[in-house]
Image (tube, rainbow, N blue to C red):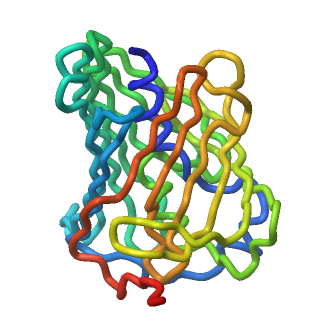
Amino acid sequence: MKKFRIIITSFLIVFSIPVNSQVELYGNSYNSFTDGEILEYKLKYGFFNTSYASLSLDEIDQDGEKIYKASAVGRTTGMARLFFKVEDLYESYFEKDFVKPIKSIRDIYEGGYIRNSETEYDHTNNIGYFKNKLNGEEREIKLLDNIQDLVSTFYFLRKHLDISELKLNDYIFVNIFFSAENYPFKMKYLGKEILKTKFGLVECMKFTPFMETGRVFRDNEGISLWVTNDENRIPIKVKADLRVGSITADLFRFRGILNPFKIIIE
């Protein structure tokens, strides 16, 4: 049942910030989301609905400044919950003008695997102040440049990525802070694709994150990600090819999006 933990986590980390190329790809800001947006996903393993995930965004006041709080929730449903209970919560607090994390919270239960931690970010000195809430451990961790957390990365790319600069087979190199560690990561852009969804035909950008091979995924391109090629830039589908089948996550409901959701009319 470890695959449910991995796919829910993978669903959250498919986007991150590039190590280099920031000047070319991230010099602008785009109005791609707003306060009150909610995205909801169903995860399927074979013919079974196994899990549910959601991303929600709220504007809050912190010391007199308006910032965003983004929450990602993941949990198993139905029969899968009887065999492997998952209750995951990831939260990210970040600035509105230029997305970078101020604070991250990870509070998860995955079949007996429990983690509850909080990280605050000092981007000037590239230091993360990590606290394990279960045992009270506190650490200062040196961060890689241009770090993002699991959740803020969705919003960073939606707001700052200049998709006009992306070319077929380009690589996006990323730095993620997760589970008290820095993770260099890369993702390949595979171009545009028309995707059949429950909402109709939607033009998407397709990406492949490179993952560790041999343990769970069939190869080092075991996950595919589709993002709407419109002003919203919504992750609409994730597919993971495992050694024992595949799991897909599909957008099934959304509320509060800022721009029109574009559907191709035949």
Q: Is residue 3 left or right of residue 185?
A: left
User: Residue 69, image x and y in percent?
Assistant: 27, 58
Residue at screen point 22% across, 68% down: 59
User: Residue 266, image x and y in percent?
Assistant: 48, 89
221 lies above or below 145? above
User: Residue 168, image x and y in percent?
Assistant: 81, 67
Q: Is residue 238 left or right of residue 183?
A: left
Q: Image quarter for residue 108?
A: top left
Q: Image quarter for residue 184?
A: top right
75 lies above or below 231? above
Q: Nearer the viewer, residue 126 or 13?
A: 13
Location of the N terminus (image quadrant): top left
Q: Image quarter for residue 161?
A: bottom right
39 lies above or below 239? below
Q: Can residue 184 be seen in this view?
A: no
Residue at screen point 43% across, 77% down: 232
Residue at screen point 76% across, 78% down: 165
Q: Which of 244 and 190 is in front in this view?
A: 244
Q: Can residue 34 be seen in this view?
A: yes
Residue at screen point 19% across, 23% down: 79
User: Residue 136, image x and y in percent?
Assistant: 28, 15
Number of marks in the rendered image: 0
150 lies above or below 219? below
